[in-house]
Amino acid sequence: MQKRAGILFLSTSSSRLFLIWDGKWTVPTVFREKAVIEDAQPLLKNYNLTDAKFVPIELYTSRDSGFEYSTYVVLVDNDFSSPDGTYCWATLDQVPKNTHVGLKNTLSNKITQVKIDTILATGKSYDID
């Protein structure tokens, strides 16, 4: 089974999410081989982030069980820039056009919206793995 994890960076200062351009607007994604915290380390170093805490908010498994995609929220204090590629910070209710369909589905899901709002309201996340 192919496993990937999307990292939804949320800024506690602006309440915006970090998106990258990869043919469509999406969140940074890592291949899952071990624990998400280990697999995401190169990504976190790329954005100069340390001590990130991951909160799982969604798990998608394809109908044939050949693909699994999990989405994690990582809170950051401030908006940051991306050293490579095109990026933007967007509000949760106004994502840009050409957003990846999976991300659109995640952000429009009422249960996921409540989870994200709760995480932002508390301003903290909890360790997993």
Image (cartoon, grey):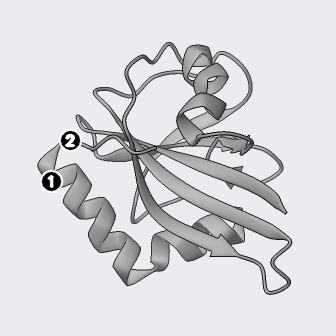
Q: Position of residue 34 (x, y in %)?
A: 67, 39
Q: Say which of 121 and 33 sits in front.
A: 33
Residue 115 occupies quadrant = bottom left
The crowding category of the residue bearing disc 2, from other C-alpha atoms within 10 Å (few below 14, some 14 to 19, many at least 20), is some
Measure the alpha-carbon separation of dots 2 and 1: 8 Å
Task: From the image, state whether disc 2 or disc 1 is nearer to you.
Answer: 2
Above or below, 45 against 20 in this view is above
Looking at the rendered structure, the kind of residue marked 2 is Lys
Can residue 4 be seen at all in this image of the molecule?
Answer: yes
Q: Please name the residue shown 13% across and 49% down the image.
A: 122
> Farthest residue toward the left?
122
Tell me the quadrant of the picture where the N terminus can be found: bottom right
Res. 124 mark = 2
Q: Where is residue 97 in the image (x, y as percent from the top left)?
A: 65, 63
Give the secondary structure at mark 2: loop
Residue 117 is left or right of residue 122, and the answer is right
Residue 77 is left or right of residue 62, and the answer is left
Q: Please name the residue shown 28% across and 27% down the image.
A: 77
Residue 76 is left or right of residue 88, and the answer is left
Residue placed under numbered mark 1 in the picture: 121
Q: Position of residue 94 (x, y in %)?
A: 45, 62
Looking at the rendered structure, the kind of residue marked 1 is Ala
Residue 40 occupies quadrant = top right
The crowding category of the residue bearing disc 1, from other C-alpha atoms within 10 Å (few below 14, some 14 to 19, many at least 20), is few
